[in-house]
Image (cartoon, coloured by chain):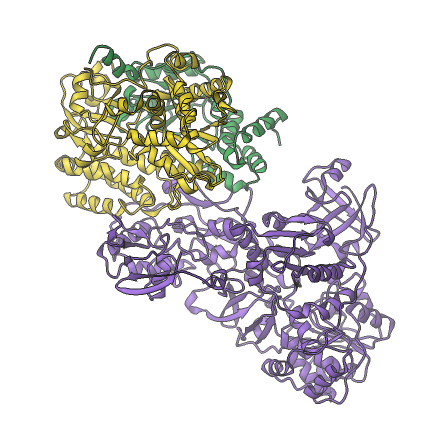
Chain colours: A purple, B green, C yellow
Amino acid sequence: MSPENAVVTEVEMITVVIDGFDVTVPKGTLVIRAAEKLGIQIPRFCDHPLLSPAGACRQCLVDIEINGRAFPKPQASCTIPVENGMIVKTQLTSEVADKAQKGIMELLLINHPLDCPVCDKGGECPLQNQAMSNGRTETRYEGVKRTFDKPSAISSQVLLDRERCVLCARCTRFSNEIAGDPFITLNERGALQQVGIYEKDPFLSYFSGNTVQICPVGALTGASYRFRSRPFDLVSTPSACEHCASGCSMRTDVRRGKTLRRLAGEDAEVNEEWNCDKGRWAFKYITNKERLAHPMVRGEDGELHEASWPEALARAAAGLKGKRAGVLVGGRGTVEDSYAYAKFARVALQTNDIDFRARLHSDEEASFLASTALNLTVSYRDLDRADHVVLVDFEPEDESPIVFLRLYKQVRKRGLRITTVTQVMSRGSEKLQASAVASLASVTELTDKSVILVGERASEVTGQFTSAVKLASSTGAKIAWIPRRAGEVGALVAGALGNLLPGGRPVSDAAARVDIQSAWGVNNLPTANGRATWQILEAASSGELDAVVIGGVDPLDISTEALGQLLNKSTFVLSLEISHSAITAIADVVLPVAAVSEKSGSLLNWEGRPRFFEKAITESLTRSDLRILSMLADEMGTPINLPSAKAAASELQAIGKWDGAVISMTESPLAPAQTVSGNQAILHSWRQLLDLGTLQGGEENLAGTARAAEVVISEARASALGVSSGDLLSISTARGSISAPARIGKISDSDIWVPRNSLGSQCIASLGAASGLVVTVVKA
Amino acid sequence: MAYSSEQLAIFDSIIARYPRKRSAIMPLLHFVQSISGYVTSEGIEAIAAKLELSTAEVTAVSTFYTQYKPGPVGEYHVGICTNTLCAVMGGDAIYEAITEHLGISNDETTSDGKVSLERIECNAACDYAPVVMVNWEFYDNQTIQSVKDLVDGARAGNPPAPTRGPNSLRTWKENSAVLAGLTDGLASEGPSAGAASLLGLNLSKEGK
Amino acid sequence: MSKLAPVLSAHWDEADSFTLAGYKRHGGYNAAMKALAMAPDEVIALVKDSGLRGRGGAGFPTGTKWSFIPQGDNKEHYLVVNADESEPGTCKDMPLLMANPHSLIEGMIIASYAIRASYAFIYIRGEVVHVVRRVQQAIADAYQAGLLGTNIGGKGFDLELVLHIGAGAYICGEETALLDSLEGFRGQPRLRPPFPAIAGLYARPTVVNNVESIASVPAIIEYGNEWFQSMGTEKSKGFTLYSLSGHVTNPGQIEAPLGITLRELLELSGGIRAGHTLKFWTPGGSSTPLFTAEHLDVPLDYEGVSAAGSMLGTKALQIFDETTCVVRAVLRWTEFYKHESCGKCTPCREGTWWLVQMMRDLEAGKGTPADLDKLIDITNNIAGRSFCALADGAASPIISSIKYFRAEYEAHLTHGGCPFDPIASTLFATAGRA
């Protein structure tokens, strides 16, 4: 049942008789679903509970009478809502329904190829299964089956075999109704009707993989999985997505130690039955050739050499013990791993210099996180019921795609009002029919049913968090923080931040420290608020810190200087990483860690909802961060006693949420608007969902559907520059430049937008900054 | 974008006819055909841009309707009705004879680009069977010879006038403009009604 | 007294019948002015009381349809006229619009006023350029004369009328497919409910009526219900256009009171073509089950035809004599339904595709008599299973032809092909000018 139905308290209930059994269901329930409630499976193809009824395949025909009046012909049970006095006879009790269903099945099969043995869907195919359960044993068709050229690549990652298609329109309805991307359509008509794209425009939707999953036959297949496996050879494990804070439930399918595919899991409260293509297809990073297999230690020759675990741990302990060290957690870790970092920093390193923010960040943000973001009281359900949603420096389609789907659903369903605080109108905002405002000061008409969603990029606008918090408190609107990465909310709760101990306990609060001391059995904890990421890096560079422990961090996500700051010869760098990276290249000791599918644990999504998962690749011998940190702490003689994720989870749970006074928000004034003239412009950017992100490595088919880099400029700037959409522009700073085609869009004349980390547009690397910077824009 | 500003202004005027702009997709496709003779990719992209639709959505519509052509047709597009009644009354024989005469078959165009051929379905002129449509103008009560004369005339540049239509036959593109809702001022040409349409009226006047 | 009743066709023999002047010369637009002086509900009541039923095939009472439009709902209402006329055999609306387009426009003014619509559409099929011209011109002239646009006839009623031109799709004659097409989508039928009266065009209350139904309204307003009801039968009131085509001496349009028989129509018009006999006919287009000579005296009204096992449909009387092979005729219709199937639902899309193959085999004499039973069984798996009535239409000629002419099907099998000479059934064979 969909959540919005669940929250309605007064639902009229209707009782109908199906195959002789009474069933009582809410008014509006379709007959096919009322039957499900009785355990009666009516065969179907086009029906999908989350898509609008189509009545197209006609497989679910049943006999219906209402108050003694029988319909003259069998009815599609997927389109008819229950009514009082209704008596339904399915194939189980009606010969007419049974013959109708067998007749439809025969018609569906006359043009369906008998290629089940080589079809990816074979073994898990609704057509195959229902042909067995509800079909005739033999066909009476003697003609030649319809064929098409195959496969047709509707994008680099989705292939279409049209002769297998039963034209149920699930894929086209999904694309249009759920994703808002009507790039695949039913074309031609009659017996030649077929799913297709416009020849020049491939199916570039962030959500295209869902069509593969809901295709009831083998017509749509994923290029990366095609011909790779049989479903009965796969071992499936429920899992959680590590790619963003939406918190999708997933299923990981593994064969002999290797992940072959991932599917969206079902969770009505979160992702319903959908996920994004990154979540579905970006999993090759764990098997790429850059994957670290062994610990490595930098030798006398200055090179990294493979080392044994004891040797590497000893070297790491020596580099850290008694030293002034900081910890950069990454932001992609599990709750348990982040907790281990938090505890390791305080217990083994005696410092609060720990920060999970491996990206642009601010002190104002740390104050917001401690004072507001920790509340975690807003949920997807609040979005379903909201009267107005305000997006603050947050692009849901790129930065939290399931939040986007949820908002889009409400926009379609009831015209949910959305306001976005941004400098540029994105495609996602267009789909949400959002009104764009440049500043929170322009946002009006909020009530206690409104929700303000603040993205991590608010840290890039001084005063933005302050304004958002003020707006929430003056209007009663709910406020929530939606970071991009999957581990940040968990890390916040786990205390992987300089001003917070686990459970949201302020470092500055003596009682809070006592809580933790007693939980951990230690006599003292550092009392000063720790450094933020940027400060840790500066301290490493200046020599104020001797060592840095770094989880999964890409220094170019933070700044151009970050890597150089770590290169201070006297600074000891310990890197815990999955694969070789810029950090491992300069580290003194590198310890290989397990990827999400190789360990168990949990992530907290933006709502604060835990997403537990088990180890999917059971054969994996890799160790999780927390296991390694625990071993290292033992080696240092300052044990943190976290032998397993389970142990970490129960310890964190026992500590519980802080019930004392929370840190109040330290207000920052809004930065004055910058002014530019001539060829100058203020740079804006965000990371697109599919870009050069580390965890997307190794999956070319997915990369092929990324949105190409473009420079968004206003009409006025375009005419001033004498360019039209598609013409190449060059954006430059003293550091370097980016060239990409122009797109004339809705953006203020003084601003420009480029993707932050896409092929051909890497802002920090090329321009030295990602937002707020004044750049020069010229025709290339 | 190669459409002229005059053409784009017509796009806008067509869109303006409707309370919601998506409704303009069909006349716009006819208009694209009046410019290029068929539905070009340029046309699909221009319509998608004007109506704020995806190109796939425009393609879905253009491939649904048989009057929208995916490639060039002749200057004179000849449709021979071979639905049951016309087929029985001679449409089949005409179709067979004309394919042989022109050396082309269904959905093909003569090498000079003048005449293309299509088997068409019932065109709502059964009382004038067998019926042939050229550029969607009525040629009533046809025979094999009359259609041979018709296509020969068309290839020579002087096709005979339609039975119930304007005084002279217009080209495919010209008539496509009418289907886009643009007027050509020829409404008053041709008879009010053909003879068969007057059957009952005349019988009544005879006192029957 | 004449058995015929030329009303809509009364002046088609005048050279300017399609012009505003020609129309006004015979009292044109008086009815609209009369209606605009009445209350809208009075107009609905009058049309309801007249007994006028839909002339597009289904025969639903026109006034009742109008009365379904919710009033006072503060929503836009729309009137959409179905001028897609594409059912094989049907050829009445096109000559009507070519010769007398103003009767439709006047009817639309009245209907729109009655249902409180200020926007109306004519959805006309695209394969009839000259009819399009006539309607375009008529609309333009009506605007010019103040009969469309704002403050029509000074009565304070506003109406915008848009001519929407189709592009070749029989299915768009189905009213919900028509609405989707008019909204700019593929013309595929919609789920019902909601019905158009509640959520039609742009999800607003909408009346969809056939051309002839609306064009009949002005005469009813002008001459009254007593006059209208003096024609026709008990439940099928008034006059209508019968379209006679095929193997008759004189094909054409005959406007007559409902309930006239084919025998009467043939007697009036000159009969079956000389030297031949009636074999089978359709009462209302190819989707209506075939009739034979035994049905010559069936009253051609909604009830009469229905009681005899078919449907009045569009009153498209396609007449075939003994030279016609029924298998060939039915195959062609089957090919038509396959060509026109929209593709949305399985039984129609796959079924018509299969039926064509089976019918082709039978026509070619391939198969056994058992294949006829298979054909019937598969046809029955299609009829009544599909999303809309198109597939039911495809089944009608097959089932009814086997019912009456099973032996002829079997003769194809024993003969090893079609035993008929196709040339014998052509017009040239009669006229002797092949």
The residue sitting at 53% across, 46% down in the picture is A183
Residue C152 vs residue A280, the one in the foreground: C152
Quadrant in which residue B132 is drawn: top left
Is A399 above or below relative to C307?
A: below
Q: Position of residue B89 (x, y in %)?
A: 25, 22
Q: Position of residue C221 (x, y in %)?
A: 35, 23
With A494 as the anchor, is A281 left or right in this view?
A: left
Q: Position of residue A713 (x, y in %)?
A: 72, 43
With A595 as the anchor, is A717 left or right in this view?
A: right
The residue sitting at 20% across, 36% down in the picture is C306
Q: Position of residue C196 (x, y in %)?
A: 40, 40
Q: Name the quarter where the N terminus of chain A is drawn.
A: bottom left
Is A755 above or below relative to B82?
A: below
With A381 as the anchor, is C211 left or right in this view?
A: left
The residue sitting at 38% across, 13% down in the picture is C17
Quadrant in which residue B148 is drawn: top left
Residue A322 vs residue A78, the one in the foreground: A78
